[in-house]
Amino acid sequence: MDAIKTWWLGLCNDVAVWWSGICDDFYLCFVKEDRYKLILDGIGVTIKVSLFAILIGIFIGFLIGLCSLSKNKFLNFIGKVYTDVIRGTPSVTQLMIIYFVVFANVHWEKWIIASIAFGINSGAYVSEIIRAGILSIDKGQTEAGRSLGLGAVQTMLHIVVPQAVKNIFPALCNEFIVLIKETAIVGYIGIMDIQKAADFIKSATFEPFLPLLASAIIYFVLIKILTVSLGFVEKALRKSDVR
C-alpha cells in the first residue's frame, strides 16, 4: 500500500508540475503583452484574404472554363496555357512574383495583392471544376434551349450553368477549404495571418508548442465551421432534385 501511495503522490505531483508549466507557457505565449491579439488579427486576415481570393478565383475560373470549352482555337489555347502554367508552378512562387514584381510599384495593401495572387491561382483549379461541371450536363439540355430560340450565351447562362452549379458546388467548397490552408504562406510577403502570428509568438517566447498548436486548432475549427455551413447549403440545393 505504501508503494502505491508513493507512486500515486508522485504521479499527482508530476501532473501538477506539468499543468503549472502549461499554464505558465500559455500566459507567456498569449496573455503577456496581449499576444493573443496577434492571433485574433491573424484570423481576420486569413478569412479576408481567403474570401476575396475565392471570389476572384470563381470569376477567373468561369471565364477560363468557358475559354477551355470554346471552339475558338485562340480562346481554347489561352485556357489551356493558363491552367497549365498556374497548376504547374508553386503557389508561393506565384505569390512572390505578383507581390515583388507585378505589383512592386503599386501601393496597395498587402492583403489585397495576396487575394489577387491566390485568386489567380485558384482560378486555374476552379476553371477545371467548372469545365467538368458543364460537360456533365446532357447535350440535350443545350439542344432544347436552342430549339426554343435561345442563343448560345442565353442557353449557357439560363439552362446549362444553373444545372451545373449543383454538380460543381461540392468541388468549389473543397477548393475554398484548400485555399484557406494555402493562405498560410502569406507570411512570405510580411502579412500577419494566423500562421505568421504563431511564428512571431514562437520566435518571441522560444516556446514553439502552444503557438503552433493554437494555429492548428484555429485552422481546424475554421474549416470545420465552413464545412458544416456549406453542407447545409448543398442540402438546400439538392432539395429541388427529382428523386
Image (cartoon, rainbow, N blue to C red):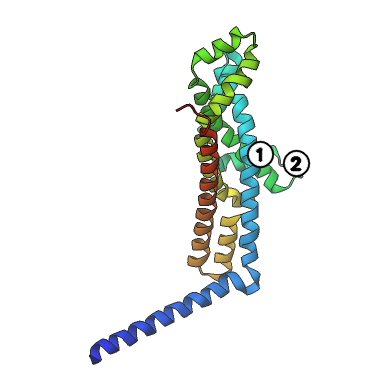
Q: Which of the image's four quarters has the C terminus?
A: top left
Q: Which residue is mark 2?
A: 105
Residue shown at 51% from the left, 69% from the top = 207
Check disc 2: other Cα within 10 Å, few if <14, some if 14-19, many if 20+.
Answer: few
Residue at the disc numbered 1: 116
Q: Amino acid at mark 1?
A: Ile
Q: Quadrant of the N terminus?
A: bottom left
Which residue does the image show at 60% across and 40% down from the upper left?
118
Q: Is residue 90 left or right of residue 46?
A: left
- Please tell me whether mark 2 or mark 1 is closer to you in this view: 1
Count of residue discs: 2
Which of 197 and 48 lies nearest the eye of the viewer?
A: 48
Marking on residue 92: none
Residue 227 percent location from the top left of the image: 51, 46
Q: Secondary structure at mark 1?
A: helix
Identified at 48% across, 22% down, the residue is 136
Q: Amino acid at mark 2?
A: Asn
Q: Is residue 28 above or below residue 151?
A: below
Residue 79: x, y in percent?
57, 22
Q: Quadrant of residue 156?
A: top right
Q: Is residue 98 visible?
A: no
Decide which of tag 2 and tag 1 comes sooner along the chain: 2
Q: Residue furthest front?
A: 243
Vertical relation: 63 (above or below) 235 = above
